[in-house]
Image (cartoon, helix red, strand yellow):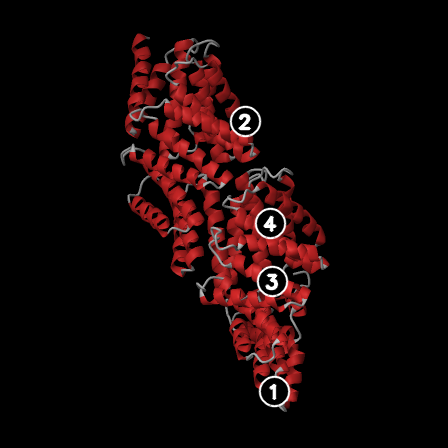
């Protein structure tokens, strides 16, 4: 009995050495010793409960170091047994309570189960209330309490939770000497609290403090410590956030170099999935600033590698899927490949699966799925995508507290999706709901907050929608005010050109509403400046198209201006293969109409003819019959206009050809299918039958 009791004591000593050294092998040996000693002890009494609590702590430590999910480690079950067996007034009871709280927090962090977080908060509070003033484990109790409250803040957005978390972690840091084995963990946690303070207040000093604290955490451990690379990846993530805010290329370069160097060391898979997500996110941020296709490709590669490295139960999987969805949507905007948007939808579905919308990550994943569905609707015009996006976005809005305690970043994303929905549906009900959220977001987001630019931009767009739907002059004034705030030169610019573009569009509306050409001239100047600084990103084609529209309006007031530039801009937009087909048909019609008004019949035929040639691509065979019919009905009547211009140009044969080409798009597709089957039936009857079945499915009215 004494031999095995001593075995448990030896296991405890070895556990302390493992904590100091970061040795997984030593930790495994300590776990084996503790289990051996406990197996022969009577399952009661303070000594038994103490060693059981030590075993729970060791199992939790192993889960953290090796990436094994805490739910599979046995730590929580062992910790509950230790707390149940420990006398109520025993001096080590606070340690057992705190260890169990830490294990429950880790399971919450991996699964998102709110009940675990609530129980962890209760246990962490009990541990602190029972702890003696000079308890050597007090810094650990404070650190656990701090990180539990930090996670609670993600739900409640209660400033008191964040302030208490800051106080607890700072006290823990003050009480932990640099040579203590938990010093690095405590320093990194203090950095995490300051990062949340930066997100809440927009004060960059908190982000600067976060970076320095996380640098200190990484520097205080050697490369052989299991968490060393995690702490370095935390530094890189914070550097990426500072780059997104301030645009200093040194930050993004350091972050990428750090991550690439560490990933080559091939640490544990649990690190790789996290580091590759941060690397992909950092490349995406740089792409949004530079427009470099190489950065976008590197982001996608890093995220796919992260998913390959992640275990099925890895909590990073949802973040990797959501980030990859964002990258795919950016690529889709740039290249126009319809297959990419289908993958984006699938990725977002996997990211959102099982995550509650009243939790920040669940709401963000759900909004990402809504954005992907709306992007696909823009190509396919399948109303089921639109309906799903509206339902999902509504569920997120319903879960948002009315007082704005759901975070400016989340509200900015919600407003962006709502703007897209309203643009497609012109639904005044959605407009009313989104406008209330916009007012709440504006009131809850300080001027210095990093999300203020996007909140102001997206709120301004909502008020512009209100003007366009209801001709509300006050709404237009409000839109201009908010968009001017978002586009101010002294604002830390978002990493894309949509904010100044939105202001230019609103100025065009202001000019039309008041009959004043000055806002129109300002809009033209802004669009010219954006066009000269284009990076190759998706905003560029919108700048080109709207510069053409603005110049055409300006020419109505100043006919002496040359018109060739407008026609060239329209030609560039209408022949952009990456642009959505419906947009290209609309620009082709504008090109043809404007050229006709100026007596340029050949140029008019080029424009209208381009639109006619695009109709089969608009109603492509991959869409169901109903979607193809809907798209053709939404497109302008380029066929009739093309025929009229051809007749005016004394080209009757061309008029007949254009009518034949444009009026029988769907019928031609049916005939092509039937003709192609004739030879196939003779050579491969079964394959022909299968293809005929698929073709019939595509022609079903319900699709």
Question: Which one is earlier in the sequence, the residue at label 4 or at label 2?
Answer: 2
**Residue at the spot x=37%, y=39% of the render?**
211
Please identify, in this view, whether the residue under mark 1 or under mark 3 is nearer the observer. 3
Q: Which mark is residue 415?
A: 4
The local crowd at label 2, few if under 14, some if 14 to 19, many if 20 or more residues have their Cα within 10 Å, is some
Q: Quadrant of the C terminus?
A: bottom right
Per the model, the C-alpha gap separating discs 1 and 3 is 41 Å
**Residue at the spot x=57%, y=62% of the render?**
504
Disc 1 target residue? 654
Q: Are marks 4 and 2 in contact (CB under 8 Å)?
A: no
Residue 221 versus residue 396 in the image, above or below: above
**Residue at the spot x=34%, y=46% of the render?**
259
Please identify, in this view, whether the residue under mark 1 or under mark 4 is nearer the observer. 4
Please identify, in this view, whether the residue under mark 4 or under mark 2 is nearer the observer. 4
The local crowd at label 4, few if under 14, some if 14 to 19, many if 20 or more residues have their Cα within 10 Å, is many
Residue 182 position in % (x across, y down): 34, 26
Disc 2 target residue? 118
Disc 3 target residue? 507
Q: Is residue 225 visible?
A: yes
Per the model, the C-alpha gap separating discs 3 and 2 is 50 Å
Question: Which one is earlier in the sequence, the residue at label 1 or at label 4?
Answer: 4
Residue 490 position in % (x across, y down): 48, 52
């Amino acid at each position: 009995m004494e031999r095995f009791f001593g075995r448990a004591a030896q296991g405890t000593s070895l556990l302390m050495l493992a904590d100091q050294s970061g040795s997984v092998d030593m930790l495994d040996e300590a776990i084996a010793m503790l289990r051996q000693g406990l197996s022969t002890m009577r399952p009661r009494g303070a000594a038994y409960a103490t060693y059981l609590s030590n075993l729970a702590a060791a199992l939790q430590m192993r889960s953290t170091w090796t990436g094994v999910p805490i739910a599979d480690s046995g730590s929580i079950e062992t910790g509950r047994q230790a707390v149940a067996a420990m006398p109520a007034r025993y001096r080590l009871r606070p340690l057992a309570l705190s260890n169990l709280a830490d294990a429950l927090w880790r399971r919450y962090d991996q699964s998102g189960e709110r009940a675990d977080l609530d129980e962890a908060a209760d246990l962490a509070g009990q541990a602190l209330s029972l702890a003696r003033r000079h308890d050597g484990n007090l810094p650990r109790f404070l650190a656990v309490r701090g990180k539990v409250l930090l996670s609670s803040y993600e739900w409640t957005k209660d400033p008191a939770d964040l302030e208490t978390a800051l106080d607890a972690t700072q006290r823990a840091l003050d009480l932990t000497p640099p040579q203590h084995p938990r010093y690095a963990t405590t320093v990194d946690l203090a950095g995490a609290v300051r990062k949340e303070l930066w997100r809440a207040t927009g004060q960059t000093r908190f982000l600067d403090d976060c970076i320095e604290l996380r640098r200190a955490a990484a520097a205080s451990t050697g490369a052989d410590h299991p968490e060393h690379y995690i702490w370095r990846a935390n530094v890189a993530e914070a550097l990426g956030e500072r780059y997104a805010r301030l645009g200093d290329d040194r930050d993004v370069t350091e972050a990428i170099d750090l991550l690439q160097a560490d990933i080559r060391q091939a640490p544990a898979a649990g690190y790789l999935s996290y580091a590759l997500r941060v690397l992909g996110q950092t490349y995406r941020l740089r792409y949004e600033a530079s427009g470099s296709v190489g950065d976008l490709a590197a982001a996608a590669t890093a995220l796919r590698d992260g998913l390959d490295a992640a275990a099925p139960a890895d909590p990073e999987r949802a973040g990797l899927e959501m980030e990859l969805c964002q990258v795919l949507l950016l690529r889709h905007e740039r290249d126009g490949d319809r297959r990419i948007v289908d993958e984006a939808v699938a990725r977002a579905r996997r990211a959102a699966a099982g995550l509650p919308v009243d939790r920040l990550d669940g709401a963000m994943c759900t909004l990402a799925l809504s954005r992907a569905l709306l992007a696909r609707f823009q190509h396919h015009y399948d109303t089921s995508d639109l309906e799903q996006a509206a339902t999902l976005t509504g569920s997120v809005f319903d879960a948002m507290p009315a007082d704005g305690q759901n975070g400016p970043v989340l509200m900015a994303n919600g407003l962006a999706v709502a703007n897209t929905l309203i643009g497609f549906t012109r639904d005044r009900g959605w407009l009313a709901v989104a406008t209330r959220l916009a007012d709440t977001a504006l009131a809850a987001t300080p001027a210095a907050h990093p999300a203020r630019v996007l909140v102001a931009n997206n709120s301004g767009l909502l008020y512009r929608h209100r003007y366009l739907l209801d001709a509300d002059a006050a709404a237009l004034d409000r839109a201009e005010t908010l968009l001017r705030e978002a586009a101010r030169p002294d604002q830390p610019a978002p990493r894309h050109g949509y904010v100044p573009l939105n202001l230019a569009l609103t100025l065009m509306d202001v000019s039309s509403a008041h009959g004043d050409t000055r806002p129109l001239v300002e809009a033209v100047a802004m669009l010219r400046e954006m066009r000269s600084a284009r990076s190759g990103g998706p905003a560029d084609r919108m700048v080109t198209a709207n510069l053409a529209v603005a110049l055409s309006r300006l020419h109505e007031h100043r006919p002496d201006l040359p018109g060739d530039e407008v026609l060239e801009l329209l030609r560039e937009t209408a022949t952009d293969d990456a642009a959505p087909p419906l947009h290209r048909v609309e620009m082709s019609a504008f090109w043809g109409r404007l050229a006709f008004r100026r007596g340029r019949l050949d140029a008019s035929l080029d424009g209208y003819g381009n639109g006619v040639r695009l109709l089969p691509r608009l109603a492509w065979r991959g869409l169901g019959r109903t979607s193809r019919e809907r798209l053709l009905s939404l497109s302008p009547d380029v066929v009739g206009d093309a025929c009229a211009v051809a007749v005016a140009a004394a080209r009757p044969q061309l008029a007949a050809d254009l009518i034949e080409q444009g009026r029988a798009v769907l019928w031609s597709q049916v005939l092509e299918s039937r003709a192609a089957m004739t030879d196939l039936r003779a050579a491969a009857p079964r394959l022909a039958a299968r293809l005929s079945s698929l073709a019939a499915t595509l022609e079903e009215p319900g699709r």
